[in-house]
Amino acid sequence: MKIDLTAMFAKILTQISQRKLAYSLLLIAYCGMLNSCNEKKAEETKEEEKSTTEVALTESQYKTVGIETGFVEDRNLNKIIKANGYTTVPPQNSAEVSTLIGGTVKDIYVLEGTYVNKGKVLATIQNLEVIEMQEEYHSATANIEYLQLEYNRQKTLSDENVNPRKIFQEVKAKLATERARAQAAKNKLEALHVATKGSSSLVPIVAPINGYVGKINIAKGAFANTGVSLFEVVDNSQMHLDLNVYEKDLGSISVGQVIDFVLTNQSNKSIKGKIFGINKSFSNESKTVAVHAKIDPADAKGLIPGMYVSANINITNTTVPALPKDAVVKNADKYFVFVQQEGNIEEEQEHKEAKNEKAHEKEIHFKAIEVIPGTTDLGFTEVKFVDKINSDSKIVTKGAFYLLSAMKGGGEHEH
């Protein structure tokens, strides 16, 4: 039997070609499906990203919510540094009243909260040593009177060479000694605010400054020790603030800057002050420096030392792009504003099976644009856009909070 090798070989080649073609077709179809899937995924991802940054309202919703739009404005805003602190008075306006000599408390003449003038007697204490000081003073002054006469007589005799010079010198020395003794006794009595005339064992405790009596640490009949505070007297007319400013902000602080502060635990009434001093050393381990600010006496009425305050230190007044503060909303750790998408106003028609067919309302689209907020002052917030936008873009100034909630599907939100 004769085999036609040529025909057989041609048949095999034909089968191989058909298989290659089939494989090629399958490969092309697979690649097409793969590209289609990738394109679909890209479209889905793009659509998903779009849905998380955009929100649409119907015209009726737009009116109901009260959406208002505006434009970015250039505003003069004060840059501020926030600081906490407390009210205080200068050292010379606060006094701890004590006694230079111990004794039993005889009388107390004031109550806590009483206003007293400098020199007012707050209390008296009794000590018999005071009588001895007065007697010593009287004795010394009596001796001075006698020795002065003797001094004059001896000086005359000495000048006429009647008596030896030595006697005159002895009288002169005694006179100087008695004068010194009398002056010492007088100084002691004056320091105790006790009169040199008369004889009394009572020592008055007097107010060293004008002000209000604070804490009273003595009781009638008790023994008052030296060096122990008996009364506190505070003059609130020169009230000022001690603010704690962090190291990073020190370069922006200078004498003369105006501050606005409120009492932390009381009303939100704003009070003004002015910086007059900056410490040159750190106050404590928190790396803060004490900054001192004056308060106008008229505004200081009703303030007492130790009140905690929250203050804004006004640094500069600059022109910056700004929006009403309600236009900026917070989502997680980022800040956004909503821009109206004028080109995305769609008109969709929905046909219903009911007899009265109704056209669907127009939808107005808004897109969330990330911003970096800056200074807030006078109801406006400085904004810096992460991505550039058109200068004529309409930005939601009222209702941004609602749009954020709608964008998040009505979930929890922050403002």
Image (cartoon, helix red, strand yellow):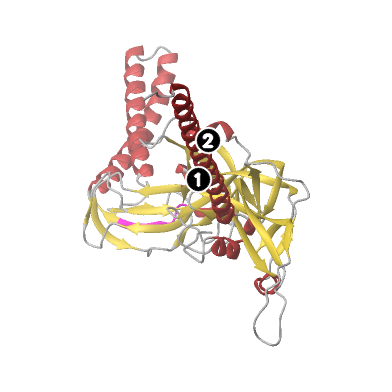
Q: Residue 286 location, x and y as percent?
A: 38, 37
Going from N to C along the chain, the mark reached first, 1 or 2, is 1
Task: Classify 10 Å Cα crowding around label 2: few (below 14), some (14-19), many (20 and above).
Answer: few
User: From where the camera sits, is residue 218 visible?
Assistant: yes
Amino acid type of the residue tagged 2 in the rendering: Asp
Task: Classify 10 Å Cα crowding around label 1: few (below 14), some (14-19), many (20 and above).
Answer: some
Residue depicted at x 31% and y 19%: 170
Q: Is residue 50 left or right of residue 11?
A: right
Q: Residue 108 location, x and y as percent?
A: 32, 62
Please name the residue that numbered disc 2 is placed on. 249
Q: Is residue 59 above or below residue 26?
A: below
Q: Which residues are magenta?
A: 118-124
Amino acid type of the residue tagged 1 in the rendering: Ala
Comparing 79 with 9, the one in front is 9
Residue depicted at x 67% and y 74%: 350
Quadrant location, the C terminus: bottom right
Q: Residue 138 location, x and y as percent?
A: 32, 42
* Mark 1–mark 2 distance (CA, rounded to whole Å): 10 Å
Look at the image and say whether residue 119 sits in the magenta stretch: yes
Q: Is residue 368 above or below residue 5?
A: below
User: From where the camera sits, is residue 238 visible?
Assistant: no
Please name the residue that numbered disc 1 is placed on. 83
Q: Residue 352 location, x and y as percent?
A: 65, 80
| Quadrant housing residue 213 | bottom left
The local secondary structure at tag 1 comes to strand
Residue depicted at x 70% and y 68%: 348
Quadrant location, the N terminus: top left
Q: Are marks 1 and 2 in contact (CB under 8 Å)?
A: yes
Look at the image and say whether residue 133 sits in the magenta stretch: no
